[in-house]
Amino acid sequence: MLSSVITSAWVRGWAVSRGTPPPVEQPWGYRIDVGLPQHVFRHVLPEPDEETVRALCADVTVPHAWLKVLAAPEDVTRWITPGWTVPDDPGFMMFTELRRTPAPALPDGYTLRTETRDGVVRARVLAADGTLAARGQIAPTGRTAVVDQVETYPGHQRRGLGTVVMRTLQTAGAAAGATTGVLAGTTEGRALYGSLGWRYQGPLTGVVRTEEASAQPAPHAA
């Protein structure tokens, strides 16, 4: 199934991008030990259902553990139990064919810097005063590559900087031998990615554990 292939590629590439241990396959998907105070680990569920989500919600009691569920937020909100919350904007899995495509020229006063570290290509756009205006990174993992942490900072938006970063990353991924790009986008970023030829695969909803005590299962919706 295409969604499972894309999710598998995203999970592998995300772990490389963030410098975490490799994902561990589970019956329901993948576990990644992130190791951050506000993001201890994440479970990724490529083909979720209510029973599986509720079982994981009951089993996981560690604060700041995350579930990344490939389902619409309205469904996930009904499935989760007390002690879990949906803190993020709706997310979207997207993919594209990677090609070497020149980035447009930057506006006057901006410069582009790229570097590769631990297999991850990072692109940064600096303003005239040297401060960071936009950024992003791509992690190639064979025939696929994951675009991650794309951001344009306040005061520098609507100047085409995001397009420069994305074109730079897509070209870097293609140069590394990847043919397919994968990313998890936000509502704000989806328009940019769509304008650059990225296609929508499906929803991605994040939920986070907010309490230490085990939560009692919520009543099933009628």
Image (tube, grey):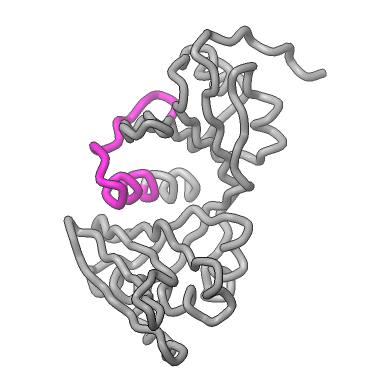
Whether residue 136 is situated above or below residue 101 in the rendered picture: above
Give the percent coordinates (x, y) of residue 153.
50, 66
Quick check: is 87 in the magenta stretch? no
Whether residue 212 is situated above or below residue 147 in the rendered picture: above
Magenta span covers which residues?
9-29
Residue that protrudes farthest toward the left in the picture: 118
Depth check, front residue: 94 or 39: 39
- Write the residue at 56% across / 32% down: 207
Whether residue 205 is situated above or below residue 158 in the rendered picture: above
- Write the residue at 40% across / 84% down: 110
Give the percent coordinates (x, y) of residue 205.
58, 40
Quadrant assignment, res 78:
top right
- Write the residue at 46% across / 27% down: 64
Give the percent coordinates (x, y) of residue 169.
35, 71
Quick check: is 13 in the magenta stretch? yes
In this rendering, position of residue 132 left or right of residue 47: left
Whether residue 193 is situated above or below residue 8 in the rendered picture: below
Q: Looking at the rendering, in which quadrant would you find the C terminus?
A: top right
In this rendering, position of residue 117 left or right of residue 136: left
Residue that protrudes farthest toward the right in the picture: 222
- Write the residue at 54% across / 17% down: 211
Depth check, front residue: 205 or 107: 107
Give the percent coordinates (x, y) of residue 154.
55, 67
Count of all numbered marks drawn on residues in the image: 0
